[in-house]
Image (spheres, coloured by chain):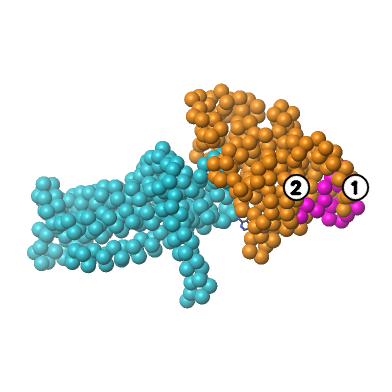
Amino acid sequence: MFGSSSIERLLIEIGDITYFAKRFFKEVFTKPFEFKEFLRQCYNIGNRSLFLVGITAFIIGLVITLQTRPTLQEFGAVSWMPSMVSISIVREIGPVIIALTFAGRIASGIGAELGSMRVTEQIDAMEVSGTNPFKYLVITRILAATLMLPILVILGDAIALYGSYIIENIKGDVSFRLYFNKALNALAFGDIVPATIKTFFFGFAIGLVGCYKGFNCKKGTVGVGLAANSAVVFASMLLFILDFIAVFITDIFFEI
Amino acid sequence: MITKAHIDVKQDAKSNNQPIIKIRNLRKAFGDNVVLNGFNLELYEGENLVIMGKSGSGKSVMIKCLIGLMQADSGYIEIMGKDLLSLNQVELDKLRTEIGFLFQGSALYDSMTVRENLEFPLRRHKHKFGPIEDTTPLVEEALKNVGLLDAIDLMPAELSGGMKRRIALARTLILKPKIILYDEPTSGLDPITSKEIIELMRNIQREYRTSSLIITHDVDCARVVAERMILLVDGINYAEGTYNELASSEDEKIKAFFKQ
Ligand SMILES: Nc1ncnc2c1ncn2[C@@H]1O[C@H](COP(=O)(O)OP(=O)(O)O)[C@@H](O)[C@H]1O
Ligand SMILES: [Mg+2]
C-alpha cells in the first residue's frame, strides 16, 4: 500500500509540475524567441523517434489484422476488416501506442539530457552567458514535442494501415485501392479531429514532464538516471489520464 | 583568530581603492541546513583573493549568490558599485559580461564543439557586442591564450579533464571580464595539470589585470595564488590574512586546513 508520505510526495510533485507549466505559459509568449533552437529540437525529436514509431506502428497494423481475422471470418465479416482496423487505429490505438513509444524515447531523452546539464552546471553556465535557460532549453523542447507527436501519429497511423493492408493482401487478395477506399471511407470527422487534438496534448505532456524532471534534477549521477526513469513513468501515467479525459469529452460531443 | 595582521592588510588595500565586490552579512539556508550565516567579503581591484573551506561548507553557494544564480535569504551584495538585488534582468546580464565564472566541473556544453562553446557567450551577450559578423578571430585568440588552438573542432567528450578546464577558462576569458570567479579550478585534476592551470591563472591575471576570487580546498593552489585569504567555516568568514599568517595560526580550526 501507499504510505501517506508517498501520496503526499505525489501531490507535491503534481503541484510542482503545474507550477512549471504555468511558467511555460508565462514565458512562451515573451521575447526573445529561440526560433533556431526550436527548429533544431523539432528535427532532433522527430528524427530520434521516427524509426521506432515506424516499426511499432507497422507491427501493430500487422498484428491487429492477423489476430482479428479468424473472428471476423467466423461471422463472415472479413470485408469489414479495413473499416474496423482504420477506426480502431485512428481513434485510439495509433495515438496511444505511438505516444507511449514517443514517451519512452523522448521523455527519458530530455530528462537525461537536461538532468546532466543541470548536474554539470551547464544550465548555470548558460544563465551567466546572457541566456534564459528556461526559454532556450525548456520552451523549445516542449513546443517541439507538442508539434512533432501529432505529425508522428499521422505518419504512424498510415504505416499501421499499410501493415494491415499487407496482411489483407496476402490472406484475402484485397487490392491496395479497395483496402484504402474502405479504410478511409469508414473514418468520419468525429474520428479524426478529436484523435488529432488529443495528440497535441500528449506531446505537450511528454515534453513538459521530461523537461520538468531534467530541469529540476538532483545532484549526482544517480539523479540523472532517476530523472530519465521517472520522466517516462510519470509521462506514461499522464498519457492514460489525458486519454481518459479526451475520450470522455469526445463521447459527450460526438456520441461515438 | 587573526586580528591585527589582517586589519593591516585590509587597510593597505583599502587605502588604494574601493572594493570591486562587497558582500555583507550573507545568509542562505536550505530548509534546516543553514549554509551561510552572515558571511562578509571584500574583493579589491587587481587582487587575488582565495576563499578556502571544507567541501560542503557553502563555497559554491556563496559564489552562486554572488552572480545571481541563487537567491540569498538575506544580505547585501555589491559588484562594481551596483547593488545586485536592485538590478533588472537586462542590467544583470550586462553586469555578468564583466564577470567571468569558471565552473567547478568546467561545464562545457556537451552538445556543442569547442568553437560553438566559445561562441555561445559572444553571440548571446548582445548588449555588449551587438551582432558579431565573424567570431573566428576572437575564438582563436582565446584558444591561443590557453594553448589549445588545435582543439577548436573537437567535442568536449574528446577532451581530457585538464583540457576541458582550459577550454572553460578560454570561454570565460572571451568576454574580457574585469572579475573572474574560479570555483575550485584544480578540483579533479592531477597535480601536474593543476600546476599548469594555476600557472595559466597567474598569466591571465598579469595579462588582463583581472581581479580574481578563487574558491578552493587545495592548500597548494592557495599558497601559490593567494594574495589574501578568507577561511569559510561554519557559514562565516572565520579568519582572514595572508597565506603565511593563517598557516602559522594557533587556532585549531585554522590549523586543520593546513595539516597535510
Ligand atoms: N540547490 C541546493 N539545494 C539544497 N541544498 C543545497 C543546494 N546547493 C547546495 N546545497 C547544500 O549546501 C551546502 C554547501 O554546498 P556547496 O556550496 O556546494 O559546498 P562547497 O563548499 O563544497 O562548494 C551543502 O550542504 C549542500 O548540500
Ligand atoms: Mg563547490
- For image coordinates 61% across by 53% down, the residue present is B71
Which chain is tinted cyan? A
Q: Position of residue B63 (x, y in %)?
A: 67, 47
Q: In screen coordinates, is B76 left or right of B225?
A: left
Residue that mark 1 sits on: B4
Q: Position of residue B80 (x, y in %)?
A: 68, 39
Q: In screen coordinates, is B159 left or right of B197?
A: left
Which chain is tinted orange? B
Marks 1,2: beta carbons within 8 A: no
Any magenta on residue A165?
no
Q: Amino acid at mark 2?
A: Leu
Residue B131 in view, yes or no: yes
Q: Which sits in the foreground, B140 or A97?
A: B140
Which chain hosts label 1?
B
Residue B33 location, quadrant = bottom right
Can you say whether B226 is above or below B143 in the image? below
Residue A233 in view, yes or no: no
What residue range appears in magenta?
B236-256
For ligand 1, tell me if the residue under mark 1 lies within 8 Å. Answer: no
Which residue is farthest top?
B137
Q: Position of residue B67 (x, y in %)?
A: 63, 45
Element assignment for label 1: helix
Residue that mark 2 sits on: B41
Q: Which sits in the foreground, A76 or A160?
A: A160
Tag of residue B192: none
Q: Which sits in the foreground, A98 or A121?
A: A121
Q: Which sits in the foreground, B141 or B230?
A: B230
Q: Amino acid at mark 1?
A: Lys
